[in-house]
Amino acid sequence: MEDVARESGVSLVTVSRAINHPEQLAAATLAAVRSAIDRLGYVPNLTAGSLASSRTRIIAAVVPTIANSIFSDTIDGLSLALAQRGYQLLLGQTHYDAGQEARVIGAFLGRRVDGIVLVRGSTAADVQRTLRRARVPVVEAWELPERPVDMAVGFSNVAAGAAAGRYLVAQGYRQLAFIGSDEMRSGDRLAGLRAAAAEHGLPPVRVGSVPSTATMGEAARALAALRSDCPGLRAVFCANDMLAAGVLFECCRRGVAVPQRLAVMGFADLPIAAEITPALTTVRVPSRRIGQHAGEMLLERVAGSRRARRRLDVGFAVVARESA
Amino acid sequence: MEDVARESGVSLVTVSRAINHPEQLAAATLAAVRSAIDRLGYVPNLTAGSLASSRTRIIAAVVPTIANSIFSDTIDGLSLALAQRGYQLLLGQTHYDAGQEARVIGAFLGRRVDGIVLVRGSTAADVQRTLRRARVPVVEAWELPERPVDMAVGFSNVAAGAAAGRYLVAQGYRQLAFIGSDEMRSGDRLAGLRAAAAEHGLPPVRVGSVPSTATMGEAARALAALRSDCPGLRAVFCANDMLAAGVLFECCRRGVAVPQRLAVMGFADLPIAAEITPALTTVRVPSRRIGQHAGEMLLERVAGSRRARRRLDVGFAVVARESA
DNA sequence: CTGAAAGCGCTAACAT
DNA sequence: ATGTTAGCGCTTTCAG
């Protein structure tokens, strides 16, 4: 930076301003500094800038796993919103492990990130306390806690599960089942499904429990177990479209007609839902928009707006296709 | 940090050492400092540390898009390798745009990341020059350029395409087609396929060109066009499994028997390949291992090893299933 | 094994 | 519109 200052005959601050507050400089000065920067190939050190300004221009995102396409659109939307404003994205995975989550968040706090997006985070009390004490802007995404750590953007997983349940009931199915993990938000969707079943006097919902990390293969096995356990099974709601696709593939292999013999419903409305045969009835969630909103809420807060919206409900919608 | 030093009756340096070089301290001193750290809830500022040590403990990854499951396992493997050694992952997307790629890389250099992973990066000359001048460790992943910027871990896309072609030829198909983008690595696979066709005196490979960002829907449309254009079409090789799945779904909708009427082959061996019906014949690529190796190579280099391996060929394998 | 001094490269107040 | 003066919070020599 000193080289640039010397080369363009100004002081250090002026170079700094040319980079961060160009509007404060006379046009001629700005041009001179910029040309010196180009000539010397100067690349400002953002680390030093961060230390001096105590703003890192980094937002961190914590996701269960990136290998799951469910969240990738959210990350994509977030990354887009950040890139537009010169922010960068630090990514951490928890692999659905609370200890790992705490460790990742600790590292992010040490890095003094300007904000954190928690996608489907745990509600571990100590993590919440850590975050509050750090006074770092946080948005919880893909859910809407009663009392968020800071901000939240998402939808009610219970309501989404209930909506799926009501749709299945309306189609005339009585013996319902659920395939998914029974913890966290997936568990909330199960709770909603159960509520809908109870509401209409249906028999108890059968549960094919799979790990949070489960993919198509596990779903197929869970379905097989469920069917031999409960021959009267008429409809199954899966915690996400990948599990549902696994179920559909299993039905195809076994010659089970969908939806005539068994109705299948998914969650998220991933691209595959519309393409698979039979096309998958599912619950659409604005995944990318969740990420964008999360980014914008965070940046607004960083910019100093105190009275930012704290809870944003982006809703969901049942998408009726062929499978149920 | 000063508070911790006072609280434990040592100097600043000693606190710093307790954090970064605990082995250099007497056990008693270390314990005292650690207990003070806990009591005060001290979180070291990594930004300041980075500035002082000129090591950020951040590795950056540049991917075309995270929304494509093809690369997510690589990111996952990379993130794992990094987390184990206390490194963090900064993620940038190019959306297959060279300007965006240059901008992202520029931002990473400004951040003084300790290393950069380029997943399927462009070979834009100016980007290469920028990276070389920055003297930052770089690994190009998912390909094996003749003359890498620095290091590379991947496989030969041309060879992989040729292997797919030879497999199809061996199954007796003569009129081959390709669905994918014709730029970058996908184009290399097409080149390999063409070479294999030429080798055996087959008619020219038909190409259903789709954008790099294409997904199942576009692949379905490309197939429809290809089939009406060339009724004798017997086999189609898709640049990735998602495109292949789109083709399979289209065949299912149109009642085209696979592989009897049309053989379909994919690339990557994503989870869906084994589950879909008919099971997808594809080319397996060790996606997660590519990420892990990339991380390890980078960290080794950061640790000072000069004579690190520069090119690592992880290979690929044709996986014969039902679709071809 | 521990400490004192000297920055890392930049930005934020104040000046002018 | 530009410059001066102080740091930001840590790590790195170099001494003991």
Image (cartoon, coloured by chain):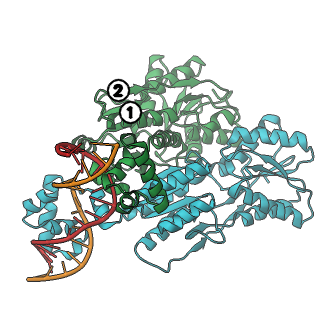
Chain colours: A green, B cyan, C red, D orange
The residue sitting at 37% across, 46% down in the picture is A20
The residue sitting at 64% across, 31% down in the picture is A280
The percent position of residue B94, horizontal first and vertical second, equals 57, 49
Chain letter of mark 2 equals: A
Q: Is residue B5 visible?
A: yes
Quadrant of residue A1 within the rendered picture: bottom left
Q: Which residue is mark 2?
A: A309
Type of amino acid under label 1: Met
In the drawing, does residue B211 fall left or right of residue A197? right
Picture layout, residue A253 above or below residue B80: above
In the rendered image, residues at marks 2 and 1 fall on the same chain = yes
Q: Which residue is mark 1?
A: A297
Q: Secondary structure at mark 1?
A: helix
The percent position of residue D8, horizontal first and vertical second, equals 21, 53
Type of amino acid under label 2: Arg
The percent position of residue A211, horizontal first and vertical second, equals 47, 46
Quadrant occupied by the C terminus of chain B:
bottom right
Q: Secondary structure at mark 2?
A: loop
The residue sitting at 29% across, 35% down in the picture is A149
- Distance from Cα at disc 2 to Cα at disc 1: 8 Å
Is disc 1 surrounded by few (<14), some (14 to 19) or many (20+) residues within 10 Å?
many
Q: Please say if the residues under marks 2 and 1 sit with CB atoms less than 8 Å apart.
A: yes
Mark closest to the chain's N terminus, 2 or 1: 1
The residue sitting at 59% across, 60% down in the picture is B126
Picture layout, residue A147 above or below residue C6: above
Point out which mark residue A266 bears.
none
In the drawing, does residue D6 fall left or right of residue B136? left
Picture layout, residue B150 above or below residue A62: below
